[in-house]
């Protein structure tokens, strides 16, 4: 047999095999697509809030040899009416989807999808988009999705909000658990009032844990990173920047208690928009842990998610339920650090189980506290560096800025020394340590009366203002 005939025979057999495989895979694709729709609707029911309900309905599938056409309606019901987003997807059957073959991608997958979403007709006069929302995604045989979605530039006419076009990359998306990773190179938003927001190099990872008993607690692990976050307004002379932003959150329920912790880290700067001068505030870091009654907290978060116009009468009963069930703040630390030093605040707060509504005096409040403490430390070199930065931003030269900062520091330290009954001052820092236990409060190691507590709290407020460089 000639070589050309052999090659032709191989191509024919391969073509028949791929076609048969694609047709068989098409049945799997439709089943998995419907599973994804059902899973999404279940998730939407869990997170329905802000007086809105959403669902995907009227799903229609038309199978061809190498692809399936899918159409659906994504309906969002709001108090003022319902809006229908029309989705039209093309599901290319694996193992070698045609849309990937055209790009030279030979990696086998169960299916590859071209996604298109059209805005409701009612939005035509409200949202002006340069083109439809579209994307391309793939579903692996292992059940994970990845893809890239294009959000066109758009303008919301009502408030003048404008967004530049952006691309969203999705990876490791599990349709069953909704765990995923996503990346967005840049987000640019601006409105008619001259307010602008930009996020650069955004990365987000979500590993949610769904529970029937506590669907509104946001359990699981969440991690957000961004190279830079910036906000500016024409009404302010200063723009606010956060570089190397990191936000982490974890939550779980054990023995009907919500145990959660969060972390926020970022380099903070202010920028004078006229002179384009930076005020380097330093690296901010916060860590917080909570131990709360899970059921009461779930009730409060559910109530808050369903309305943004709650009254005190609606919120207070739910908040009191949480406070009456021994809430704890095992760790709460905040710090700001620059090249000269670091100022910090740490708080440990443990409430006994009781009736918060009956607290009508300082003593009853102390009786409700158990092993709680507040520590404030203001680094003097850190504060002087901040004051110097602010002086430079006001247009002073380095020598003038240093002189002014030292003068203000002398006033600050002098004020603290006059309050030596409440503040411990040495050559490097000023600090206050409050502890509450067994119905008593101690300040820097000595017991204080209930009458002194108000004076102590006022002094702490003044330290915070001066310690931040204001």
Image (cartoon, rainbow, N blue to C red):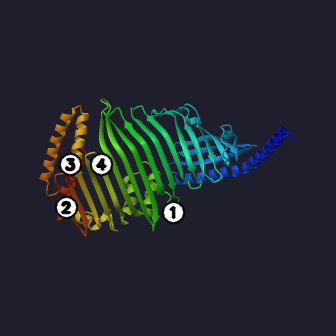
Mark on residue 213? 1
Quadrant housing the N terminus: top right
Tell me if 107 is positioned left or right of 20 in this view. Answer: left
Q: Is residue 2 above or below residue 34?
A: above
From the image, tell me which residue sits under label 4: 336
Mark 2 vs mark 1: give the one in front: 2
Q: Is residue 341 above or below residue 128?
A: below
CA gap, disc 2 and disc 1: 44 Å
Pick whichever, 399 or 437, lies toward us.
399
Tell me if 105 is positioned left or right of 417 in this view. Answer: right
Residue 237 showing in the rendered view: yes
From the image, tell me which residue sits under label 3: 380
Mark 3 vs mark 1: give the one in front: 3
Q: Quadrant of residue 132?
A: top right
Tag 3–tag 4 contact (CB < 8 Å): no
Q: Picture coordinates of residue 97 (x, y %)?
A: 69, 43
Q: Picture coordinates of residue 222 (x, y %)?
A: 47, 53
From the image, tell me which residue sits under label 2: 444
Q: Mark 3: which secondary structure?
A: helix
Mark 3 or mark 4: name the one nearer the start of the chain: 4
């Amino acid at each position: 047999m000639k070589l050309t005939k052999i090659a032709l025979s191989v191509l024919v057999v391969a073509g028949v095999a791929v076609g048969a495989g694609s047709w068989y895979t098409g049945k799997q694709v439709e089943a998995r697509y419907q599973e994804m729709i059902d899973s999404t609707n279940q998730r939407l029911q869990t997170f329905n809030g802000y007086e809105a309900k959403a669902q995907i309905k009227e799903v229609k599938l038309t199978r061809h040899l190498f692809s399936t056409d899918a159409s659906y309606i994504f309906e969002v019901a709001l108090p003022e009416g319902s809006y229908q987003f029309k989705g039209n997807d093309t599901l290319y059957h694996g193992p070698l989807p045609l849309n990937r073959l055209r790009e030279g991608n030979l990696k086998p997958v169960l299916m590859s999808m071209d996604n298109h979403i059209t805005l409701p007709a009612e939005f035509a006069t409200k949202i002006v988009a340069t083109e439809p929302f579209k994307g391309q995604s793939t579903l692996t045989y292992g059940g994970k999705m990845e893809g890239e979605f294009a959000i066109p530039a758009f303008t919301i006419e009502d408030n003048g909000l404008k967004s530049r076009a952006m691309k969203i990359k999705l990876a490791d998306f599990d349709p069953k658990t909704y765990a995923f990773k996503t990346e967005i190179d840049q987000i640019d938003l601006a409105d008619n009032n001259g307010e602008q927001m930009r996020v650069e190099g955004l990365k987000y990872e979500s590993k949610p844990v769904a529970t029937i008993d506590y669907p509104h607690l946001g359990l699981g692990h969440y991690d957000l990173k961004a190279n830079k976050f910036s906000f500016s307004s024409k009404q302010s002379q200063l723009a606010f920047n956060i570089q190397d932003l990191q936000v982490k959150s974890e939550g779980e329920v054990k023995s009907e208690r919500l145990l959660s912790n969060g972390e926020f880290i970022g380099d903070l700067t202010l920028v004078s928009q006229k002179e384009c001068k930076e005020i380097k505030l330093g690296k901010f870091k916060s860590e917080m842990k909570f131990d709360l009654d899970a059921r009461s907290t779930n009730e409060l978060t559910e109530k808050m998610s369903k309305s943004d116009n709650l009254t005190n009468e609606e919120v207070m009963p739910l908040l009191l339920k949480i406070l009456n069930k021994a809430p704890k703040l095992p760790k709460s630390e905040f710090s700001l650090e620059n090249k000269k030093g670091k100022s910090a605040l740490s708080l440990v707060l443990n409430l006994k189980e009781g009736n918060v509504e009956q607290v009508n005096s300082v003593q009853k409040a102390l009786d409700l506290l158990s092993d709680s403490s507040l520590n404030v430390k203001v680094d003097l070199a850190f504060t002087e560096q901040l004051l110097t930065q602010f002086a430079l931003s006001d247009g002073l030269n380095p020598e003038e800025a240093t002189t002014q900062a030292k003068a203000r520091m002398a006033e600050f330290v002098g004020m603290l020394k006059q309050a030596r009954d409440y503040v411990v001052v040495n050559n490097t820092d000023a600090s206050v340590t409050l502890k509450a236990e067994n119905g008593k409060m101690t300040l820097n190691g000595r017991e204080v009366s209930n009458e002194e507590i108000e004076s102590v709290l006022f002094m702490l407020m003044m330290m915070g203002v001066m310690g931040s460089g204001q």
